[in-house]
Image (spheres, rainbow, N blue to C red):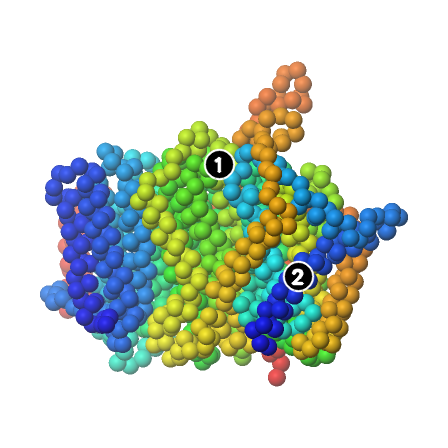
Amino acid sequence: MTMIQSAALVLGQAFLILAVSPFVVGLIRKVKARLQCRRGANVLQPYSDLAKLFKKGAVISSTTSWIFTATPYILFAFTLAASLLVPTFLSRVPLSFAGDVITVVSLLTVGTFFLMLAGMDAGSPFGGMGSSREAIVFSLTEPAMMLSIFAVGLTAGSTNVSTIVHNTALLQGIVTDPPPHLMALAALFIVTLAETGRVPVDNPATHLELTMIHEAMVLEYSGRYLALVEWAAAMKLLLMLTLLSNIFAPWGIAIQPDPASLAIGLGVWVAKVSALALLVGLIESMFAKLRLFRVTDLLGVAFILSLLALVFFYILRGRP
Amino acid sequence: MFDPAVIVPPALISLVTAHVAGALAPVVWPWSDRVKNWLTHGAAVAACTAGVLIGIGGLLASDPLAFSLPSTIPLLHIQLRLDPLSAFFVLIISVSGVAVSIYALGYVREFYGRHSISALGALYHGFLLSMILVVTADDGFFFLIVWEIMSLVSYLLVVTEHEKAETRYAGFFYLVMTHVGTAFIVMTYLVFYQQTGSFTFDSFRHPGEPLPDGFRTVAFVAALIGFGAKAGIVPLHVWLPYAHPAAPSHISALMSGVMIKTAIYGLIRVYFDFLGGAFPWWWGFAVLAVGAVSALLGVMYALMEHDLKSLLAYHSVENIGIILLGIGAGMIFQSYGLSHLAALGLLAALYHTMNHAMFKGLLFMGAGSLLYATHTRNMEEYGGLIRTMPWTAFFFLVGAISISALPPTNGFVSEWLTFQSLFLSFMLPDPLMKIVIPIGAAMLALTGALAVACFAKAFGISFLAMPRSPHAKHAKEVPMPMRIGMGALAAVCVALGLAPMVVIPMIDRVTSPFTGTRLAQSAVSESGWTLTPMGGEFASISTPVLMLLLTVTILVVLLGVVLIAGTLKRRFHKTWGCGITLQPRMEYTATGFAQPIRQVFSTIYRPTVKVEKEMLEESRYFAKRMRFEVHIEPTFQRYLYDPVVRAFNLLANRLRVVQAGSLHLYLAYIFLTLIALLLWVG
């Protein structure tokens, strides 16, 4: 790939992530509405919400510091940067050399770290409560996320997400070690629900103080700050769904950057992500939100599953 | 040209001269405290700058440089040897030393008129010099002497504020623990001595005939306990959260950042240098297990701590654990002959050693600044300090991000390397190792996540929201020298994160004599911007590119938002408090923040909660006063230390029988001993 091609691919991916992420949020809302026998808002409603929020002024708590105003930008930029390290429609991402799966997870963690700080910055007990709950949820999901991707990565002989996807795709979907893969898949799916603040871990539609986690942390945000935070959350959702689909089912992804496979890859990516979004919507409708201290049991299961996946991989690899 | 052989000797002489002059000058002349402070800490800055030169010189030198002084004491050889490993630790001590000495110029003002600045200064110099000598000593006997000086001087520094009972207790606890450690180190060296008949490190390195396996094992275990007590491995860590907070903050920065690293130096010296490369597999496994447990328990106890300095002390336990994970992985790989991977594990450990010295020094100085400004170490009395102390807040944030191993800082790079060396264990032939090492990696991952949560708590509760006490409300930013000291280490933290391609070849010079392989060629890509420990296909990161990417994205987002949406209309308003004015008492506390974690991990913490309610007489539903107390169980003290102390006291009581206080009896003892000895000799 030449420099110009690489640059075009990076920019193209950034644009796609930015453009597609609100759609996924809209899709999940639509699915939930239909399952509740409502008509629901248009799938494109999140775009209008963002546009409106960007135009509005912002009310800022006089108790806050620069951390509060800088956080949305940091969160947005770090989430976007993390998604540039993950393959979407093309298996080889130009920036892949700059960071592997640990980097992707850590970049997302920076966003969470600042969000936890911002939650405490306004001095309202709601924000503190959100940050405190996020701390425990995130402490259990982050390792599970890292370990589950690693378990797959070791089969593919790499910890770079791009190489994992590329090598798995070249196997044409032949899963070599089913037990670790299935465990890792289950772990990463639970992680996805937790990291993106979905039922049964958190409820994105609530503003009830007893139940909210993510919404409590961002309660004080308004105007364009809120827009950036919400958009970043949508990007994170898209990133997690992309990871799930491309690591465990990279079929159809473009191996070479020629126009035909790129077009197919793009179509397949949107289709896979939408399918996962439907599944998330279905789960949100079927399950009730768990009590906070039941959530940790679920996350503990994810952590143990990912660890087992890793251990299984090592044992299976040990066979002559 | 920078010729080490020309630079190092004069630098060493100036280092010793500056330390001696800096220690003595304030003692001999009755200047004012202010002048004494500038003299003594100015000399310390000069001495540490010379130390930086020695460190760089030693790393660049092609052969180890040696210095010796004549000595008439039998067995004692006053010998110094500057090989890359020693030079690396000299560099760490000196870089931290420069920053901390500048910081001390401001911090010591706190003690004007209350404590002797001369004594504080003299001990400070003794402490710095003894650490340099510990890592360069080339003789077991000499090592033990300077090690003991280091321990005693640091004890005296810990009890600077000896008017407080808790400080005296902390000091005593430290003194006991460090001597238990020293006893085991003596044992290690005696094992070598009985085989070689000499205490020089050179004879340890090349014993006439190799040590029998049993002796090697004794040396291994004794070194792990001895140096582990100084480093603060679980369960020998209990003194850290007492001693480090009790010391003046610039001393805690050195103790926690640098002094405990001398134990890491000792471990590497004994295991890789003296005991050679061929270990039984379980040695590495034992180090790895100790590391994993220390890392996880360290961060867990840190989460429950609300004394900022104790919290940081527990994080030292955590980070020592992470360093030992790297060393342990390196030892395991070494015992299976995978020298390339062994070099990677050792590299990760040394990189983390250096990083931890920098960010822990920075964080302790930050905590010291808060103590200086508010006169309390209790986080629950901080709050809102980011507005009154913006510089301290910013530097503390840099330290917090580094210690949480978030990209693109130095902590991230070294933890990444540690992860890589752990995950590469699938190359090992032994199935047991294959299962155990991933569990270590999982514990490291959990540790990393909990550390992020802990520093979100530490920073958020201390610096954000409204001041929680009058102390915090009236806090002022600290003096300039303190800000410079913190700023210097913050800059080093960022630089070490962005320039791993400079650091890795440097550490490679340290590890290659022990592992026999060089990593520098393969671990850094040809362009020099990417780290590829096992070749680019397996894993790579590039912190400079990440930094560039992040900078560009932030700028684009900032600019893009303004371009698309125009300038922002902002209104400032009080935080909505559901109709009542928000009071600092309504804010989330550190205890409250950590509550979910306390509950989830209650099997480890075993918390005891006590609630006292005083009800109104008219109704039993309205409380007049409430008192809430929560304690976590000090497991190690209760189940490990208390029984030992009780047994010791019991034994002492029994032995008191022989000590009847009668002079005649004592003379009889001497006589009997003499006869026994004569019989034995005859």
Q: Residue A84's spot in the image, x, y percent?
A: 61, 64
Q: Residue A221's spot in the image, x, y percent?
A: 63, 41
Q: CA distance from mark 2 to mark 1?
A: 39 Å
Q: Residue B129's spot in the image, x, y percent?
A: 23, 56
Q: What residue would you read off at disc 1?
A: B384
Identified at 65% across, 65% down, the residue is: A13
Residue B325's place in the image compared with B586, above or below, is below
Q: Secondary structure at mark 2?
A: helix
Viewer-closest of B583 and B207: B583
Residue B428's place in the image compared with A71, above or below, is below
Label 1: how many Cα within 10 Å (few below 14, some 14–19, many 20+): many
Q: What type is the residue that disc 1 sits on?
A: Gly
Tell me: A33 left or right of B402: right
Identified at 76% across, 68% down, the residue is: A267
- Is residue A184 in view from this perspective? no
Q: What residue would you read off at disc 2?
A: A15
Task: Identify the chain of the residue marked 2, using the numbered disc in the image.
Answer: A
Q: Residue furthest right?
A: A37
